[in-house]
């Protein structure tokens, strides 16, 4: 860490991890409600648990992206952050707003929440991921504006590296792509079409740019590879993201009322969507081979190298599986989508967040790297979480297969609830894998409470003796 | 070192590709915009249907259900529920919630007025007539 103002990233990262913890708790409850439908009912109906789970995910990812921006932009620009105070105030506004929104979900019936927050004047509620009441949505815009102002001013007065340009540019994209959240056409088909501007635009477009910029930064820092090489790779990767992903949005338009030409367009471009993830893997391992230094933060290196692989599996492979129109005809709106969603969100965006947190937190705590013991805890947590998430994805894939066979492609299709009963075993596997993930998360979080710096001398001695 | 393919060229592919495909997408979206009303019978979006849609959204129905495959996978598809169950069943079903059967997935009672219920069913009826390229594969959704 070279600039004092980078320290404002610390509360963002801690806040993100707190919300991450909350997300997993709600995930466990929602998963259990698949097995016991009256669990916590009527106090916590499934939809409330689910939107708490998904909204916490989005907010903690946004929070860690923001922390990453406040950490990376000054270092890349080689200047102090324009206003550290603004960044700190913004954090508390964001964190408080997020907490209040979740509390409102838990304690106020949704229709009542809509009534008291002016939803009738400008309807925005009742859409997946965008369930937030109007004041929260406006708050998100204000927080984003504050971030954009701060990092753009920093960029203007400092060095303009490609990583910084891609990062700040994609943060602008993130904010702009949120604006359709305020646009809710009365025509449901149009509303779905526009909803994907936010959801697809973020996770299959803009956020991949953020992922690339963060990974590029981490790899430059940890491998010491020449910046020119890293940045050339980055441009190629993000180019492929947009070349495939912009028209690739068509895979959301096959069966939702839009014209039939999207079936062809979406299928053709969707085949290309795994390409940027393959390139990300090639890129990161090439950088590893060409490294000019051995960084003591092994845990961060592990996160950074595993992110492209897991992103390829979740976003690339599991996405491809359901994306071609003839396959999606049977898989659309089943747990195949949930399997893809879990593995892609975790593999790409949760893991890049945990990568930058793993790299930056020791530096923010005035360490070169965490002690070997703390890293062992972190790496243990890493493996348990990664393997558990694979278990969740496979279990949900199993549930999806049951639906396709018994409900979608059957000669005598069974009803939804009958099929859900048949898929029960997979919901059990998912819940146990979820418990595994939770244990992995606890172990991971435990690593932050182990004091001490990385000690070169004793580690060297241990390596020589061993 | 040979510099056949430079960083500047990579950046130009990125910017050029983004602008090019975004332009195509905007053009296609405009075309889609004009075609949707025909495919979903937008002329039948009466004030009552739109009221029903508002009831649907303010009670977060897609928090458990799907509409044309989009939403949550906890409860049945609603895009074609009108054709699957018919209005009388749907009305009676919503009014009798929750079932209270132990272990079974529970739907809350939303305390809808008769007017809200009628509007909601009109909206479900409107949904069931959208041209979705023959999706879902069968009536079970």
Image: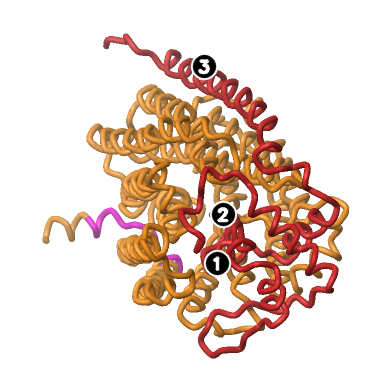
Chain colours: A orange, B red
Based on the picture, tell me whether residue A454 belongs to the magenta stretch: yes
Mark 2 and mark 3: Cα distance apart in space: 33 Å
In the rendered structure, are the residues bearing label 3 and label 1 in contact, judged by CB atoms less than 8 Å apart? no
Mark 2 and mark 1: Cα distance apart in space: 11 Å
Based on the picture, tell me whether residue A409 belongs to the magenta stretch: no
Mark 3 and mark 1: Cα distance apart in space: 44 Å
> Where does label 2 land, which residue?
B70
Furthest-left residue in this view: A465
Q: Nearer the viewer, residue B56 or A381?
A: B56
Q: Looking at the image, can residue A147 be seen? A: yes
* Chain ID, mark 3: B
Q: Secondary structure at mark 2?
A: strand
Please determine if labels 2 and 1 lie on a single subunit. Answer: yes
Residue at (35, 65) in percent of width and height: A402
Q: Looking at the image, can residue A382 be seen? A: no
What mark, if any, has residue B16 been given in the picture? 3
Q: Earlier in the sequence, mark 3 or mark 1?
A: 3
Label 2 CA crowd tier, 10 Å (few <14, some 14–19, many 20+): many
Residue B20 vs A11, above or below: the answer is above
Q: Percent from the top left, x then y, of residue A85?
A: 72, 47
> Where does label 1 land, which residue?
B76
Pick the quarter of the image with the C terminus of chain A. Answer: bottom left
Q: Earlier in the sequence, mark 2 or mark 1?
A: 2
Q: Nearer the viewer, residue A383 or A341?
A: A341
Q: How many marks?
A: 3
The image quarter in which residue B109 lies: bottom right
């Amino acid at each position: 860490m070279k600039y004092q103002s980078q320290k404002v990233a610390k509360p963002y990262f801690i806040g993100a991890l707190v919300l991450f913890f909350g997300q997993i708790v709600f995930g466990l409850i929602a998963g259990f409600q698949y097995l016991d439908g009256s669990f916590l009912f009527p106090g916590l109906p499934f939809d409330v648990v689910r939107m708490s789970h998904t909204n916490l995910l989005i907010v903690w990812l946004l929070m860690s992206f923001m922390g990453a921006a406040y950490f990376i932009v000054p270092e890349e620009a080689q200047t102090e952050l324009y206003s550290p105070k603004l960044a700190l105030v913004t954090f508390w506004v964001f964190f408080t707003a997020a907490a209040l929104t979740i509390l409102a979900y838990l304690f106020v019936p949704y229709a009542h929440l809509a009534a008291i927050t002016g939803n009738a004047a400008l309807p925005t509620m009742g859409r997946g991921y965008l369930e937030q009441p109007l004041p929260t949505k406006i708050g998100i815009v204000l927080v984003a504006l504050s971030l954009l102002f701060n990092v753009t001013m920093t960029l203007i007065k400092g060095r303009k590296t490609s990583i910084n340009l891609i990062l700040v540019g994609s943060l602008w994209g993130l904010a702009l792509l949120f604006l359709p959240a305020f646009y809710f056409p009365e025509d449901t088909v149009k509303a779905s079409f526009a909803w994907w501007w936010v959801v697809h635009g973020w996770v299959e477009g803009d956020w991949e740019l953020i992922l690339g910029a963060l990974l590029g930064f981490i790899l430059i820092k940890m491998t010491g590879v020449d910046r020119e090489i890293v940045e050339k790779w980055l441009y190629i990767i993000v180019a492929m993201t947009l070349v495939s992903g912009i028209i690739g949005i068509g895979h959301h338009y096959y069966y939702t009322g839009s014209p039939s030409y999207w079936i062809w367009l979406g299928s053709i471009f969707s085949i290309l969507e795994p390409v940027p993830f393959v390139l990300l893997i090639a890129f990161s391992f090439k950088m590893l081979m060409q490294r000019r230094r051995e960084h003591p933060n092994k845990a961060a290196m592990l996160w950074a190298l595993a992110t492209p692989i897991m992103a390829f599996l979740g976003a690339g492979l599991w996405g491809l599986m359901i994306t071609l129109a003839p396959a999606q005809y049977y898989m659309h709106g089943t747990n195949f989508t949930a399997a893809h969603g879990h593995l892609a969100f975790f593999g790409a965006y949760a893991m890049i967040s945990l990568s930058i947190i793993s790299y930056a937190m020791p530096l923010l705590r005035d360490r070169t790297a965490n002690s070997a013991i703390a890293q062992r805890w972190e790496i243990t947590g890493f493996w348990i979480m990664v393997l558990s998430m694979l278990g969740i994805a496979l279990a949900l894939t199993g549930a999806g297969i049951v639906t396709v066979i018994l409900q979608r492609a059957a000669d005598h299709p069974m009803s939804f609830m009958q099929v859900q009963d048949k898929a029960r075993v997979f919901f059990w596997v998912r819940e146990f894998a979820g418990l595994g993930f939770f244990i992995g998360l606890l172990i991971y979080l435990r690593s932050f409470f182990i004091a001490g710096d990385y000690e070169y001398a004793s580690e060297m001695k241990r390596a020589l003796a061993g | 070192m040979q510099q056949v393919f430079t960083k500047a060229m990579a950046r130009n592919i990125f910017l050029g590709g983004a602008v090019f495909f975004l332009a195509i997408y905007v053009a296609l979206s405009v075309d889609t915009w004009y075609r949707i009303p025909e495919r979903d019978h937008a002329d039948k979006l009466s004030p009552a249907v739109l009221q029903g849609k508002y009831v649907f959204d303010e009670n977060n129905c897609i928090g458990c259900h799907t509409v044309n495959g989009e939403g949550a996978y906890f409860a049945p598809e609603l895009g074609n529920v009108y054709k699957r169950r018919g209005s009388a069943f749907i009305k009676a079903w919503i009014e009798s919630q929750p079932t209270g059967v132990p272990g079974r997935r529970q739907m809350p009672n939303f305390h809808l007025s008769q007017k809200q219920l009628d509007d909601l069913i009109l909206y479900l009826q409107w949904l069931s007539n959208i041209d979705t390229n023959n999706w879902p594969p069968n009536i079970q959704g």
